[in-house]
Image (tube, helix red, strand yellow):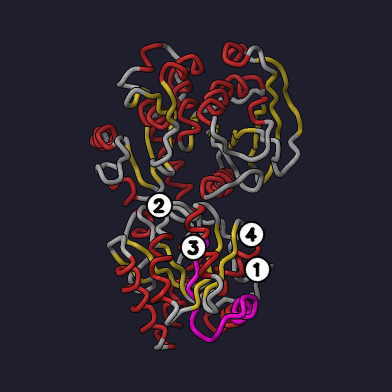
Amino acid sequence: MQVVHVGSEVFPYSRSGGLGDVLGALPAEQARLGAQVSVVSPWYEGLAGTPALIWEGPLPEVSGALGNPQVRVGELLDGGVRYLFVGMGVFDRPGLYHDDDVWRYSLFGRAVLPALRAVGVVPDVLHGHDWQAGLVVAYAHLAGIRTVFSVHNLQYQGRWNLAEASRWTGLPDWTLGPDALEFHGDVSLMKGGLTFADHVTTVSPTYALEITTPQYGEGLDGLLVRLTREGRVSGIINGLDQERWNPRTDPDVPAFADAVGKAAATATLREEFGLDGAPILATVSRLADQKGIDLLVEALPELVRDWNVVVLGGGDPLLTGALIGWSQHARVAFRQGLNEALAHRIYAGADAFAMPSRFEPCGLSQMIAMRYGTLPVVRETGGLVDTVPHDIGFRFQDATPAALLGACREATAEYGRPDAWAARIGRAMQLDFSWAGPAGEYLDLYGRVLRE
């Protein structure tokens, strides 16, 4: 089976979050299971790798929108996966994402299938990921290629003015109507992926149910209800890269395999930030409304009575400013931005990990935390429901500071029972979040899509 994944980022070559992690791990596991797998992603200016140029030239399919541009295709081979990077002038700028991304990924979407033909790749199944691949799924459908479309976060939809977008897409006029891409007077690339895919997946079973409701459906719940009734929606939980996140071999932390060994990682983190002997509650996150970081900030006056609090992340300027202010407190440490090695030390050294998310399609942080014996404190939503057992983590329902504090108090009480806390750590570190299971589920789904 020839599987082609299409997404806007892929670890370790380009990454801003969980989407890049998925595309860096799932294809490799599918290749290990016997599939022929390629990944197609933009050739960004700052790509962390040097692809070998295997094709270059104009593509008539995008010439009308760009004026006969040169398109180049680069290749990297790793772990049995063929990574193909499509380069155009619109990606020759620093960073991954910009204000004109709907235009940029529309042009990328138009170029993917012609670029695949140019280098001799004929997919049996094309698997598009999030709105940036929505148009690719539409083009593939019109070309008779079977497709799967994964929603990693429904909140981001790739919307743009309908009149302008109609000039970019190159699709038949009927596809721009309300039964396809049109969404409240705009074009929605997310809706395009949902509409034209043979099957839609989300990254956890609970999120697959949540997005059929007005609260989480982002205006697309009616369409998703219909697709669900037709049996065309599945929730498949994400896996975790077992080599990248392994406390036994992680070069950034003291190696450990149980609660006793973890104590050295905790001592290292405590010394790094000058923290006292209170337990450490940490988070590594985008500072965003979705992640509920405002709830954590509002809870800090009470939290610091019992906990040291360590935060690594960047995003919302107001939350950033609040955390900078709080970092003057002896029990609060804040580091702004992304720092891979520091993230590993925090996951390994913290006692508990806070994820007060308003919604969380899947979440990888809680899986990483448990692999390192750090017990999650999570709101009951999305993938957090599916991955955090009651006898390991501490869960709460309402998206309020009071509810978060209630779960933290429960954790504080359990921390005061060393044997019970160590038992939770042991259970957490035994959980299996490898990609083997999800990768096999996807391959089974591809087979079903091909048979249908």
Q: Amino acid at mark 1?
A: Thr
Distance from disc 4 to disc 2, alpha carbons, whole Å, reads: 21 Å
Q: Who's the residue at 57% across and 36% down the image?
A: 98
The reply to whether the magenta stretch includes residue 283 is yes
Reading the image, the residue beneath label 4 is: 339
Residue span colored magenta: 267-284
Distance from disc 3 to disc 2, alpha carbons, whole Å, reads: 17 Å
Foreground pick, 260 / 357: 357
Relative to 444, is 372 above or below? below
Reading the image, the residue beneath label 2 is: 290
Labels 1 and 3 touching (C-beta < 8 A): no
Q: Nearer the viewer, mark 4 or mark 1?
A: 4
Nearest to N terminus: mark 4 or mark 3: 3
Query: Residue 249, which numbered label?
Result: 1
The reply to whether the magenta stretch includes residue 149 is no
Distance from disc 4 to disc 3, alpha carbons, whole Å, reads: 20 Å
Q: Amino acid at mark 2?
A: Gln
Nearest to N terminus: mark 4 or mark 1: 1
Nearest to N terminus: mark 4 or mark 2: 2
Q: Nearer the viewer, mark 3 or mark 2?
A: 3
Relative to 138, is 374 above or below? below
Nearest to N terminus: mark 1 or mark 3: 1
Labels 4 and 3 touching (C-beta < 8 A): no
Distance from disc 4 to disc 1, alpha carbons, whole Å, reads: 19 Å
Residue 199 visible, this angle: yes
Foreground pick, 302 / 26: 302
Distance from disc 1 to disc 3, alpha carbons, whole Å, reads: 36 Å
